[in-house]
Amino acid sequence: MQWLGWAVGIGAFPGLVLAAHRGATARLRMVLALAATAALLVLFTGEAAALAFFALDVLLVVGTWRLARTRIWHVWIGVIVALLVASKLPAALAGTSHDVSLGGDSLVLWVGFSYLAFRLIHVTVEAHAGRLGDVTFEEFVTYALHPASFVAGPIDRVRTSAASQRREAPLAEDLHQGAWRILLGVFTKFVIANTLFAFIAQHDMTRNPDRPIHIAWLWLVAYSFYLLADFAAYTHIAIGFGRLAGITLPENFDRPYLSTSIAQFWQRWHITLSNWVRDYIFFPVARSLRARAGNRFRAPIQFAAHMTTMGAVGLWHGLTPAFLIWGLWHGLGLFLHGQFGARRPRKDGEGAAARLRTATSIAGTWLFVTLGWVFFAADLPTALRIFARLFGLS
């Protein structure tokens, strides 16, 4: 089946690149984008069954366009959320965050649906509120199912994507910028991330949590930078392929490990996801609770909003207790920062004292984030054993 994926992809993606820079109609670009994404899924999974899941994706996109402006828009969001949960259940039941085989045959899971679901919810809310502007159906389909960002994001906004699809940029400029980002992503993935992964695999704490303490810390530091390098690499590649096809995707990382607070970290790490959950989970939850309780319970409302939002982020990565704890870890950090850290008077200035304060804030934020990755790396019992080992408690 992969030969068919290569045949379709080699024709569809170059056609998409040319169509994006030669004034082709939005409908032709949509058709080419659908063909390229279908080919990508076959190549990515090696399974023809991926096409069945992709056909369902297309139906959901069409359904979103049809139902977002109707009275049942909130019901439609519930359907999308239910499907998102269902798409993660097999991996959760298998105790892993990765795609698994069901039964005797390898059945691909819903590759890319985690990102697609957030796009569809975004469009449903914006359409109901009358904020889609002049976005056309073809532009929406291309936005939702474009091969550059379908598998690994970033989570763009539909009006920004539509404007990007309409822009006219020289082909040479997009080819140059796109190729550079792809090469940067390939280097980051296969040189930096894979080198770190080799060390992680050799000293895998998830298989043997009783290794010496210094090995535990080295493993955790390597894992922390591996996650950044691996995820940033895929983002570079996605942005690069987007540029080749005439789409400017948003940046997703901005030196997150140089953040001076946990709030700033989430403004720099997976930026598009952070913005999405802020707009569609945190603000609605906070407004709803404030409308019921008023401003007398500001701290409890902030606590509930942060924990709900980051708990959802954790479960979005996988339906496991460890992912939930990872999300709540960050929710608690954001709440405490909002209650105490954000209220401290800012001490600007230069000199050794200012640089020391900045360095201390960066180190403290990085340590908090890195300790949280323990829950990202293993199931909850193993993560707790690793956590104890880091501090010599086991």
Image: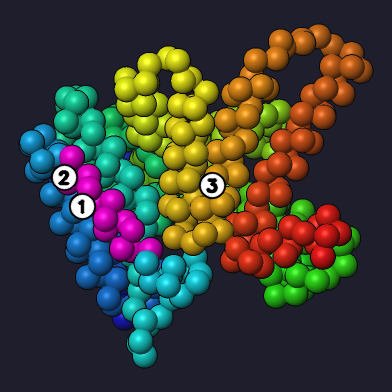
Report, in whole angstroms, how far the alpha carbon at label 1 lies from the one at label 2: 6 Å
- Measured as percent of width and height from the top left, residue 218 is found at 82, 58
- Front-most of residues 148 and 111: 111
Specify the farthest residue to the bottom.
104
C-beta proximity under 8 Å, tags 1 and 3: no
Say which mark, if any, is on residue 327: 3
Q: In which quarter of the image is residue 9?
A: bottom left
Q: Which residue does the image show at 75% across and 42% down from the upper left?
A: 367
- Measured as percent of width and height from the top left, residue 284 is found at 34, 29
Query: Relative to 91, does residue 229 appear above or below in the rendering?
Result: above
Task: Please tell me how crowded label 2 is: few (under 14), some (14-19), or many (20+) other residues with Cα within 10 Å.
Answer: few
Mark 2, residue position: 75
C-beta proximity under 8 Å, tags 1 and 2: yes
Query: Residue 81 in magenta?
Result: yes
Is residue 159 toward the left or the right of residue 45 in the image? Answer: left
- Front-most of residues 330 and 268: 330
Label 3 amino acid? Gly
Label 2 amino acid? Val
Label 1 amino acid? Val
Report, in whole angstroms, how far the alpha carbon at label 3 lies from the one at label 2: 26 Å
* Mark 1 vs 3, N-terminal side: 1
Camera sees residue 180? no
Task: Please tell me how crowded label 3 is: few (under 14), some (14-19), or many (20+) other residues with Cα within 10 Å.
Answer: many
Query: Residue 60 in magenta?
Result: no
Query: Which region of the structure is painted magenta?
Result: 74-88
Mark 1, residue position: 79
Q: Which residue does the image show at 23% across and 58% down from the upper left?
A: 57
Q: Which residue does the image show at 60% across and 44% down from the upper left?
A: 329
Is the magenta region chiefly helix, strand or loop? helix
* Mark 3 vs 2, N-terminal side: 2
